[in-house]
Structure formats: C-alpha cells, structure tokens
Image (cartoon, rainbow, N blue to C red):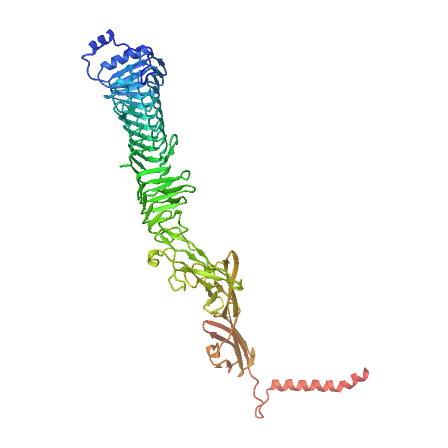
Amino acid sequence: MPAHTRTPARPFTLGALGTSTALIAGVLVSAPVSATTFTGIADFGELQARLVEANLLDGADTIRLAAGVSITGTQRLIVDGPLTLDLNGGTLEVPSIIAAAGQLRITNGTLTADASGSNGAFPGIGVDPAASLRIDAAFVTATGSDCDAGIGGYSDAIDNCTLGDSATPGALTIENSVVTATGGEGAAGIGGGFQGTLSTLTIVNSRVDAQGGAGTADDGGAGLGGGAGGDGGIITLTNSTVNATGGQGAAGIGGGGGYDTGFGIDAGNGAVLTIDGGTVSATGVGDAAGIGGGVSGNGGSTTITGDAIVNTLGDGFGASIGGGRGGAGGTTSIGGTATVNALHTGNGSDELRGIGAGFSGSTAGTTTTITDGTPTLLTALIEGDFSVSADAVLSVGANLPLTLRSTSVVLGSLEGSFPGTIEIPSEWSLTNEGRIDGSARLLGEGLVNNQGSICAPIDDEATDPLDPTDGLTVTGNAFYLPYRYPAGFTVGNAVYAPTMQEGCRGFPDASFVPDGETVPLVNVGWTLTEDGSGPFVTETTPLASVAPSQTGTFWPTMVAAEITATPTPGTVAAGETSTIGVTGPWPLSNAPTIDLTDRASFSDEGQTPGAANGELSFTEQGEKTVTASVDYLIEGAAFVATDTATILVAPAALSTLEVTPSASTVPQGGSVLLEVSGRDAFGNELTILPGDITVTSSVATDVIDGLRVTFPTASPHVLTVTVGDISESVTIEVVPALASTGANDPMPIGMLALLLMTLGAFAVFANRAPRIRSQG
C-alpha cells in the first residue's frame, strides 16, 4: 500500500441533509435563541432527523435517547452547534461523529465510533478548531481511519495523507469516563490527525487507553498528543488511569513521529504535561520518548505531582522522559509523593537513556527538578541540570544504577538504596548543600562539592578521599581521620560532613585486656593527639575546629576498668537513706571517669523496694558493708568490676523510755534510785546522759536529787521521767514508818495486851512440849 493512502470503503453521506433540511430551515429561521431537548430517540433515522433540527436551532440543545435503547447507524454524524448527546443508559454505534462547532457533550451511556477502513475524513470522534468535546460519565470507544485520530483531529486528504492538512482540534475533556481510542495511520489515539497538533486535553477521574496510529516509517501518531509531525499540546491528567502507546516513531504521551516533508523532518515535540495523582503508563516506539518527543522531537514540559504513579518506557535512541532521537530534553518536575519509573527498552542502543535528550540531542535547557515532598524516582540517566529542592526528599530506586550526566545540586535530601549506585562521570559535578543518604554507593570520576552531609558510601572512602587521582574528587566537607588501635593497626575513616554524627559515622570501642593482665583497659574516648592531651572529639564536635587540615589520626584514651563506690553520707541514723555513688571509666564516655551509679548493682542488704538505684536504708545499728558491681563487655566477654563501701548506722531518734526504780515500796522518809534507758523506733538501744533526764513527782514535798528521790510523806507517789519529748512514769508506794520506843514513852494499852497474850501462849506451849515428845 502506498505510504499514507486511505483505503477505499463504502461511501458515507451526510444523512438527512436534503430537501427536508431546507424545509426545516425555513420553518425555524425566525425561531428565538433557546435550548431544545429532544427525547425518546429510538432509531438511527430519528436520531439523524433530530440532529438536523438541533444543528439549525440556536442554543445548547440536548438529544436524549430512549432509556436503554441500542442504536446502530451506518453514516457519520456531524454536530454543528452546542449539543448534549445523552445516551440515557443506552448504546450508540456509528462510524464517526464530528463536532464542527460549539461543545459536543457525550454522557450517560456507551458510544462506539469506529471509522477504521473508512474512505474520507473519518475520525472516530472528530473535533474541529471551532468546537470542543466533553465526554462525561460515558463509555466510549473511538477508532479513526487512516490519517485521522481516534478522538480529535483529522486530515482533509482524500487519497493521500501527505496531500492534506489536519487542523488543530478544539479542547478535549474526559471526565468520570472509560475511553478507548485508537488513531488511524499516522494519527494520535487522542489528539492530532496526520501532521496535526493537539490543543488541550484534560482527563479527570477516568480510565483512558490510547493507541497512536502505526505509521509507515517513523511517522506514527502519539497515544496522547500529536499526529505525525504534530506537537503534544497541553495535557492535564488528574487522578486517572491512563495507558498510552505511540505508533512508530511517536511518543506514548507527547509528540507524533517525525514526518519527512522532503525538505527536512517535521518533528513532533512533547506536550506541556501535568500529571496529578493516578496511574499513568506511557510507551514510546521507534526511537521515541515514553513521555516527550517523537523522533527528532524535543521533550516539552512534564510535571508530576500528588500521589501519581508514572511508568514511562522510551525506545531505542529516545529518552524515557524527554527528547526523541535527536531531540532536546525539555523540562521535568517531580514532587509530592509521586513514584516515577522512567525506564527504557534498550532496543537498538547501548546508550544510557533516562530523563533528558534523545541520542545526539541537545541538553541545553534540559532540567529535572524535584520540587517538594518525598517522591521516588527510578531511572538510569538524568541529563542537563538536575536539582533537589530544599523542601524535597528524593529516593532513587535500588533496581538501576543511576548516572548523573548533569550539573547536579542537592539542597534537600537524596537517598539511594543498595544495590543501586549513583555515578558522577568525569566532567560532571554534584554540589551537595543538603544531605545524601542511604546505601547506594557514590562512584565515578567527577567532582563532588560537598557543603552539606553525605552518609552514602563513596567508592574511595577506605582510602584518602582528598586524593583526586582515583575515584571521585570530594571538596568541602571531606575529612580523612583513621582510627589508631592500641594493638598498633589503623582503620580508615572518611567523613563527608561537618561532624561525625552528620556524616553517619561513629566512634568504635577499643577496650581490651592486655596480655598477662586480668583488669581490662577501657577506651573512654578518642582524641587527635597521641598522648591524649587533646580534647575528646565527640559525635557533634565540628571537625574543622579540631582538624583544620582535614586530616589526622584518632587515638584512644585507655583507663583501667576500676570503679569507686562512695556512700553519701557515710554515717546515717537507722531508717535514713545513704546513697552510694559509683564512678569509673566507661567506653566512649569522653571523660576519664563518669557516674556509673545507674549502671551498678548492689548487694541485697539495705535494698528497699521502689528506691532508686544505690539508695540504701538500714534499721539495725552498726557498721554495714555494701558491694557495688558494674558489668563491662570487653572484646565480647563479660567483666565485672567491684568495690565496697562502709556505712555506719547509728540509732535513730528516741522513741521509748524504760524506767526501773531500785524499789517499788519504801517506808516514809526512804528513797529510791531510778535507772533510765531508751530505744529508737527500730529497737536499737540509746545511751541517755543523766543531764538529759528530767524527773518530776506527783507529790510536791518529794526531794529529787538527780535520779534519787526521797519521800517525806507516805502515800502513792508517781514519778515521771522525761527525755526530750518522750516521758515515762512509775508509781512508788511509800508506807508510814513505826512510832518511836524511847523510855519516857508509855506503851499503848493495845500493844501491851497483845504482848501479854503472846507471852502467855508461849508459856503454855513450853510446858506441854516434853509430854508430847514422851508420848511419841
């Protein structure tokens, strides 16, 4: 078949445009401007007639099919004014619909417009420049004939596409719909016809599958965008699922294939494309970009944001996103939480292709910008100017090595994952003012100007990073500070950050047990002086302040693993708390000795449930010995350091008194001596000094001399002993003394009688006693 010729088929005529049209026109010529709704359309003839009427009427008319009806027509329909075609849940099948003027709205049903094989200007759904199309809540399948788009522009050529022109279609909108569109030879699935350019295409909350027309060489049509030689226009995809594949030489989304006019290649450039959310797949064919230019076409402008998932597949010498073979790269912006897989078939080319220009295309003006958010990018190559904004954290995938053939600037964060790599080739550079993180290794022969922090591994970090003769040349924050171990060997350490912490570097432990010794040596910290006189370098120490030359050696500071336990206070009263503080060395503590109390354990005596570690309390007086222990892990083995502390426990405050008199009953005029002792609340005995004791009596005439009390009068006497706030009482019975027996004192008669009776009884007993014995 000759190139780009239409295949003859059954002719189609503009139905119902004869005498009846003139009659209707005459009747309606003076009708006022108003919207008319035609309802209940049940067959194709009636649909044609109502369409003729609507074309003659002014206003935005509506043709509504009968509910659920299925209509098949053999002629194309031409809409010559604003019209809503309400399918009303039914199905309409026609070869073609053309919107010649005004907005054509297709809604609420299923439409098939299949013009494949038709002779003449037969797009599936054609849209003239003065018209626009809106597909709203509908299921649409549209296929164009040769030279004509499935949906959009079409050629006015009859026999040969190259002899005609394709006008740029009006605005196309697809919303809340499911659409399948296939372009005819050299035309877009949705967009321009042969040599035609898309104007604007908006897809919202829809599912769209678009296949560009094949083409005969490299002059196929884009899936979404231009026909052969046509540009991609303005395309906005929002929260939609879109699958777009180009024809030969055409982009999946963007420019059509390159058309040879005989005076040069008429290239299809990429679109101004915005993808916000949704899932989009775009495949270029025959040296075209997945998103961007067709053969020889430039990349256009691509913005990807929201939570979009975008999969692009460039082919041959075309970029994944950017230019087709020979085309410049264009601009790409990625943000939000988007995931972009900008991949490549590899067909016909060993050249790396990713985001940038096509093979031999110019990278001038080619930019890739990560604008914000936390997007993920998987691609093999970024060309031109590449930047990660301060508000962005970009993750590059682990499945591909990434080459930055670009002038790259990281202001935010760039993160890679193993086994991925990030290569900066010779003659290219990366300026880092933010952070490069992750496990993907940086490599290449280029220049890294590091004004921020790099935690990612670098190919020559085990050697001197300041040596430009091998691997990357790193300037700015690049320190070589190896560790010198006590055994005499050195381990390399490169730091690409202002501090160890910002460079994701730490200090290793060098604690060990010397040969022949039992007590380990603990490495309490690293300094940059061999004799340990320099300050300890911590993870937050600005390295430039301690290593201005950017080189040096870290030396360990070794201290014996011995601890000291100190009680505070050393003497306490029973029930009071003494805290044992434990001090000693600790690995990487950056001090010769530190407080280890929280790390210590103590012997059980004196431990109180709920008390802080090291707080001990005793109730029994006396000298208490407590053992403190600290566990170390030295070279993988446990070591326990111990020390003892002595606490002197004295009795607590006086709680009870014990008063013991020398007698509990004494004669009048007699006296007692009091013995006083005391105990605390825990039963510990206290020594009470006489001077601290106060004795009082319930009888005011008693004579108190220290602890001796004399009683002039007879009666019960209550003696009270007081020491401080504690008192204890004892009762003494004082009995009257006998009367005086002097010669001048007459004996009382009662006493005399008692005496005589006693003597008489004794005499009787004495007189009988011998007889009693003799009878026995």
**Vertical position of residue 438 compared to residue 54: above or below:** below
Q: Residue shown at 56%/77% (left/top)?
A: 664
Residue 319: x %, y % from top left: 34, 33
Q: Quadrant of the C terminus?
A: bottom right
| For residue 324, side relative to residue 774 (left or right) | left
- The correct choice, above or below, for 488 with respect to 427 in the image is below
Q: How many marks?
A: 0
Q: Residue furthest left?
A: 30
Dividing the picture into quadrants, the one containing residue 279 is: top left
Q: Is residue 600 visible?
A: yes
At 52% from the left edge and 78% from the top edge, which residue is drawn? 674
Which x, y percent locates residue 28?
A: 21, 11
Along the horizontal axis of the image, is 712 left or right of 390?
right
Q: Quadrant of the N terminus?
A: top left
Q: Position of residue 30 (x, y in %)?
A: 18, 12
Picture quadrant of residue 81: top left
